[in-house]
Image: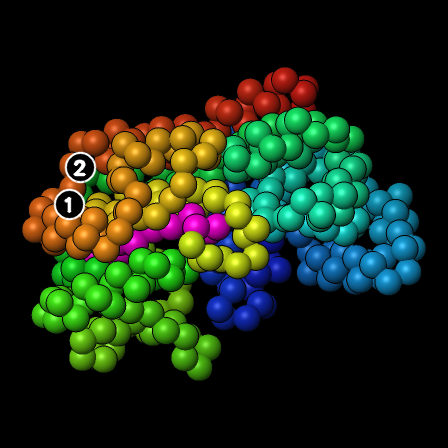
Amino acid sequence: MKILSKRVVMKDVANKKRHCFDIIFEWEDILAKELNCEVIERSKFEFAFDEKCRKIYKKTGIPIFRLYNVFNRRHEKNMLMFDASTKKQDGIYNNKRYIPCIIDYFLSESEFPEFVNAYRNNRLVLISNKEVYEYLKDKELPFYIEHFPLSLSDEYRTDEVYEKKYDLVIAGRTNPLLMEYVEKYEKKYPNLKIVRRRYVNGHFEYYMSSTGELISVGDSREQYIELLRSSKAALYTTPGMDGTRPDANGWNQVTPRFLEEVASQCHIIARFPKNADTDWYEMDSICKCVQNYEDFENKMNEAISGDVDLHKYRAYLEKHYTSAIAHILKQITEKYQIN
């Protein structure tokens, strides 16, 4: 088995999206090491051709990509590939050699047939969200499915204790209800050091909420992690909670940001439901779902005045580093005799 990566392709995308795959590349490197397999890169031509074929197929129903698969001998071995979002159209990777791992499944019930068609020729599809896996396993599917959870790269394992400069750093997608609570809390405690993020002229800017002072301008994953590490508290939400992500269709997957916030030694102020995925990640063992503003205020006050339980955090992360999760993939490959 080999791992098919988008490293070359992502170098030329818009700045706002360029670093979205960095965490995937971190997983790929650890998985390749743990499973003793090679990472190869999708060519720009292959990626562009697949996109074009999908558009043609959507308009005409003509599967031009089938010709590509007949003549393409570049990928003779089984190929593991991460799909950041769920495909809804047939394409060149819809064949038995490819093993897609779906990260974001946000489809509605009416879109289910499109999902089946887009993956029907894959022998095996990996599902990262346990909530989605439980939903799909009761369906009649033309391919096998297995649960393969998201993780955090081992490079974030450390014995270092991070210095906390700010009370709260707000980065990434935000929950509207939690942001409403933040506004109310900041008015009550105006001397807090809260850092917010905005997108200006193709770059992310981090600035002090109370003064507008620019803290940093940075788009890289390294800068994002560095800011998280400097924060006492961090907000977290699953995508379908409180309309955080309107296109999530109610799906509430635990995203890697939760693990990043734990690794950054933050008190986590969160909104999430109880479901198969939040249970799998044992989120309740790290933080409790905020119920109302009073609950939010109490949790923020505790976060600002106290330290996290580093022993508990480190023990928790040992179960969720990519090297620990790799054994699940190894078991799956052995089950289906994938080599």
Q: Are marks 2 and 1 in contact (CB under 8 Å)?
A: yes
Three-letter amino acid code of the residue under disc 2 = Leu
Question: Which residue occupies 71% across, 48% down?
Answer: 111
Relative side of 260 to 92, left or right? left
Q: Return the x and y of residue 140 as percentages of the image width and height.
A: 75, 28
**Left or right: 246 as drawn, with respect to 273:** right
Residue 120 x %, y %: 78, 37
State the residue position of label 1: 161
In this rendering, the answer to whether 144 lies above or below 181 is above
Residue range (magenta): 227-241
Q: Which mark is first along the chain, 1 or 2?
A: 1
Distance in Å between CA atoms under marks 2 and 1: 8 Å
Residue receiving disc 2: 310
Q: Secondary structure at mark 2?
A: helix
Q: Tell me if mark 2 has few (under 14), some (14-19) or many (20+) residues whose alpha carbon lies within 10 angstroms of its own.
A: some
Quadrant housing the C terminus: top right
- Nearest the eye: 314 or 253: 253
Q: Residue at x 35, y 31 (%)?
A: 282
Q: Is residue 88 magenta?
A: no
